Amino acid sequence: MSIKELDNKYVANTYARFPIEIVSGKGSKLYDDRGKEYIDMGTGIGVSIFGVGDDEWVNAVTEQVGKLQHTSNLYYSSPCVKLAEILCEKTGAKKVFFSNSGAEANECAIKAARKYAAEKNGADYYNIITLVNSFHGRTITTLAATGQDSFHNDFLPLTEGFLYAEAGNADALKKLVSENKVAAIMIEPIQGEGGVVPLSAEFVNAVAELCEENDILLIVDEVQTGNGRTGALYGYMKFGIVPDIVSTAKGLGGGLPLGATMFFEKTADVYTPGSHGSTFGGNPVSCAGAYNIIKRLDDEFLQEVEKKHDYIISELQNAQGVAGITGLGLMLGIETVKDVNEVLKFCQDNGVLPIKAKNKLRLLPPLNITFDDLKKAVEVIKNACK
Ligand SMILES: Cc1ncc(COP(=O)(O)O)c(C=O)c1O
């Protein structure tokens, strides 16, 4: 049987896969089972920040896997501590909890917010406000946090205590805060799964002010926007705000499962021994790779990300068949005049692999993609949109 037939037979039917089997890659290049080459403009949904098989990352990971692949959280572990230290140094966070995925990083953030609010204001201060069209994960609680009914259907009842506010409408948000006992407001700087929809600086600042005034925690979900993706180390930095909790995953592990929840001043000591945990969280192999990634995301590197952003915008914004471009850094959504599925198929057939977000073509290339590869990819995308 072919891989496709075996997949259909044995793998749970949760993904509508494209008829492509990726078997290897290097840098921004991916190869399928027939040896066809593609330029990777999706990085496995924003994961492989330094592309496939990046030498430095591979060395960091292989060195650690040869020493010790797992230790549990019963003992001290240097890769986990070193990663927590560099994350705190670069963000101003005070403490970090490690998990394995974006959904878990958000679960950890939500639990921490509820514990903080319950201890400070009382157990009835459990509501978390999230935004309409947001995406925060697939567990029952992070589905509840996700402000899109289409994800909720079939799985009711979800965890209670989530309220949804329209992005961009600060007055409606204020009203919701005044009428409910609220623990936290949770936002994505750019709604990724929602269609690469950035929040306005005005709205983000209004949310931060509202949180400050009401002692409500501000949680920023940087699962997709984090780790250099937007041209800043974390997307919230572009808005000049200081969150109380930041969750991240995807690019942090560079391809190995890793989630992190960062706690700032107010929330640093919310968790106490036994109040949260994870068997695999802080895995030394994932953390050794992530340390290497975070160390390399310096200002010079991030400026290169911005240059690549500018290049894509300058080439595509007035291109035939492009109705608009949204996003920051190397997280971009292209609104196409043609059906996006048609555009995507053309790209795939012509050796370029972007992805989709709602009705937009989504670009999440490796942050270190060469200008040469980027130019080739943009050329194909232009032809696809025509
Ligand atoms: C903003 C955001 N939060 C959370 C998640 C869930 O992450 P994971 O699939 O690693 O659980 C995603 C995944 O796309 C995401 O984009």
Image (spheres, grey):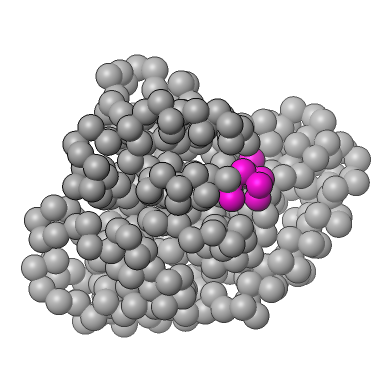
Q: Vertically, is 246 above or below 345?
A: below
At x 30% / y 55%, what residue is drawn?
100
Q: Vertically, is 266 above or below 60?
A: above
**What x and y, as percent, mark residue 4?**
45, 36
Q: Is residue 160 left or right of residue 289?
A: left
Foreground: 284 or 248?
Answer: 248
Foreground: 184 or 224?
Answer: 184
Q: Quadrant of residue 180?
A: top left
Q: Quadrant of the N terminus?
A: top left
At x 28% / y 26%, what residue is drawn?
160
At x 51% / y 50%, what residue is drawn?
208
**Does residue 28 appear in this view?**
no
Foreground: 68 or 208?
Answer: 208
At x 56% / y 41%, what residue is drawn?
191
Q: Is residue 151 left or right of residue 318?
A: left
Was residue 199 drawn as part of the magenta stretch in this picture? yes
**What x and y, as percent, mark residue 75?**
10, 73
**What x and y, as percent, mark residue 123?**
19, 36
Q: Is residue 19 left or right of residue 7?
A: right
**Does residue 64 appear in this view?**
yes
**What x and y, as percent, mark residue 229?**
58, 60
